Image (cartoon, helix red, strand yellow):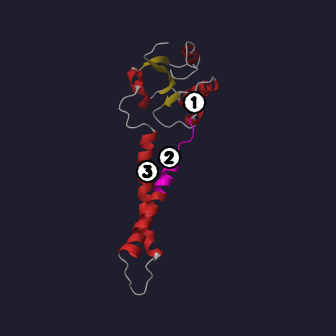
Amino acid sequence: MNQNLYGMMAEFEHPEELLNAARAAHQAGYREMDAYSPFPVEGAAEAIGFERTRVPLVVLIGGITGAGVAYGMQYYSAVWDYPLNIGGRPLHSWPSFIPITFELTVLFAAVAAVFGMLLMNGLPKPYHPVFNVPAFKLASQTRFFLCLQASDPQFGDKTKHFLTSLNPIAVHEVES
């Protein structure tokens, strides 16, 4: 195989064709693949074998951290650092801590969601090998692409024949 080859990409005209091709590739044993389309295609993620992400866990940890920081900060300032007896109210008056605790929970969870998503998706990514295929500019307009990566153990000399058997408009070699 060519050492500069990132993979092989099939170009389709309709989303159903992409979905069927992705299912066929997954059934044939390909696991290192990606699908590109101008709009979300229902079932495409499952067809290429996409598994659940850990972003919700990162958001939960961010929210719990925010709640802990907010409550701890208020508790420390009201009970330990600068205790004030105001109208006989107890120093640890937890109902007054709720608004700030809620706000920082939301803030930390949102920031964790943004940075967790960016890091887990490997973004920002200004360059990707699929941009080397001239026809790929249609992925944001009217065409659907399925790319089988050369790093897949199943990838080999028969990959181009397999993609051709799926009746695409064209099959492109993707250079690294």
Please give the name of the residue rendered at 37% of the width and 37% of the height, measured from the top-left corner: 124
138, above or below 40, in the image = above
Q: Which of the two residues, 131 or 92, is positioned nearer the viewer here? A: 92
Amino acid type of the residue tagged 3 in the rendering: Ala
Amino acid type of the residue tagged 1 in the rendering: Leu
First-in-chain label (1 vs 2): 1
Location of residue 138 (image quadrant): top left
- Which numbered disc covers residue 45? none
Quadrant housing the C terminus: top left
Q: Which residue does the numbered mark 3 point to in the structure image?
A: 112
Q: Which residue does the numbered mark 1 point to in the structure image?
A: 19
Q: Nearer the viewer, mark 1 or mark 2?
A: 2
> In whole angstroms, how far apart are the C-alphas of marks 2 and 3?
9 Å
Q: Secondary structure at mark 3?
A: helix
- In the image, is 29 to the left or to the right of 97? right
> In whole angstroms, how far apart are the C-alphas of marks 3 and 1?
32 Å
Q: Count neighbours of disc 2 (C-alpha within 10 A) and say few if under 14, some if 14 to 19, many if 20 or more.
A: some
